Amino acid sequence: MRPLQISAETAQKLAESLNLPLEQIMHMPQHILLAKMAELQKEEKQS
């Protein structure tokens, strides 16, 4: 599986918001990352 096609800046922001290491973000399957991003958006809307 190839790394995600996202910028380094985007990967850093995702790592901070998901509390995960940058390497784990870059090698995470895209569908899992999208699901985690959707969860974050729901939490932001609720607060």
Image: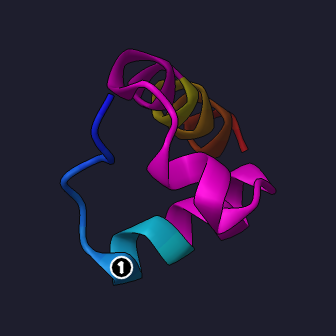
**Which range is magenta?**
13-35
Instruction: Name the residue: 37% across, 82% down.
Output: 9
Residue of label 1:
8
Magenta span: chief secondary structure: helix
Residue positioned most to the right: 19
Please determine whether, in this image, residue 33 is positioned above or below residue 20.
Answer: above
Quadrant in which residue 14 is drawn: bottom right
In the rendered image, residue 25 lying in the magenta stretch gets the answer: yes
Q: Residues within 10 Å of mark 1 (few under 14, many from 20)?
A: few
Percent position of residue 35, x then y: 48, 19
Instruction: Name the residue: 69% across, 69% down.
Output: 16
* In the displayed structure image, the side of residue 6 where residue 41 appears, left or right: right
In the rendered image, residue 26 lying in the magenta stretch gets the answer: yes
Please determine whether, in this image, residue 42 is positioned above or below residue 23.
Answer: above
Percent position of residue 27, x then y: 49, 42
For label 1, the SS is helix
